[in-house]
Image (tube, rainbow, N blue to C red):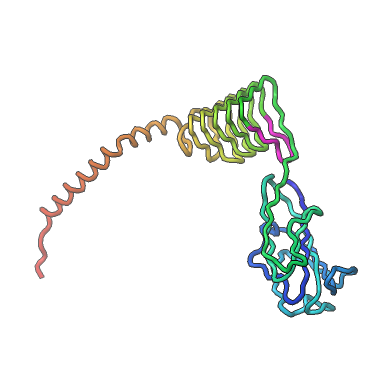
Amino acid sequence: MKRKTLILTTVVLALLLVTGQSLWAQNGNTWTIQYFNNPNWTPPYALGAYSAYIDFNWGTVPPGPGMPSTNWTATMTSSVYFPYSGAYVFQALADDEIALQIDGVTYINTIGAGMSGLCAAIKLEQLGNVILEDDVEIGANTTIDRARFKTTHIGAGTKIDNLVQIGHNVTLGDDNIVVSQTGISGSVKTGHHVIFGGQAGVVGHIEITDQVMVATRGGVSKSITRSGKYAGSPVTSLSEYNRQQVHLRKITEYVEQIESLEKRLKELEARCSVPVES
């Protein structure tokens, strides 16, 4: 996981910081708040505090002892862990000017502009690597994402077809076969001799045991703990999938039979019904 230092800088001219919703990044973190009794963050700060969330509505009330009700500023700092790479959206809502810094880089800044409620999309880079064991083959236009921090690992003898997507932190066992247009989400772990048919899909953070075959367009939505052949979306055993397909092909016949039975039942009810005397 990646730790990022978030600094939220605010300046209060009249009313400050009314957040509609607490930031997702605030969950489980502690914010260190430093209040300055001037409009330009001139040290030393006059008041320090801690908060689990940034969600305040001071109005014209001072934030604490020794602070004025207007023309003060504050910095709010927290360390946040981001478990996955990719784009994160940060939104800062306030009545007055506000700035957001992450690891010293400013992403939102309305100081001097008098605006707020802005969003910033920030990409966290992959810092890990990819290891290909001996005799691995990779087809054209196939993408293997390097890990967030550790390793995306492709086992010895594994053959990967064209147009395959393998997410970060995936571990493919030895002698796997991945057919074209298959997508394997992040942190999936497979055993040895696992086969994915064309256009198969696997959700993230699951495990697939040894000697599993997933048929074309199979959708793996949870871990597979027993070796065998699987098909469907979500996948089930191949024999069960085939039985379901037989029934689906006869669905029109089943509907006609049900309608016929309903008609006969109504006729029988009509014959057997006895009028009730009032």
Left of 88 or right of it: where is 40? right
Q: Residue furthest top?
A: 135
Q: Residue furthest right?
A: 44
Left of 6 or right of it: where is 23? left
Image point (30%, 35%), residue name: 250
**Residue 30 lies in the magenta stretch:** no
Residue 212 screen position, x and y as percent: 54, 28
Q: As rendered, which of 179 and 193 lies closer to the eye?
A: 179
Q: As rendered, which of 71 and 88 lies closer to the eye?
A: 71
Residue 215 screen position, x and y as percent: 48, 29
**Residue 148 lies in the magenta stretch:** yes
Give the extent of the magenta segment: 143-153
Residue 100 screen position, x and y as percent: 75, 59
Q: Residue furthest front?
A: 113
Q: As rendered, which of 145 and 221 lies closer to the eye?
A: 145
Image point (73%, 72%), residue name: 16
Up-down relation of residue 1 to residue 172 (above or below): below
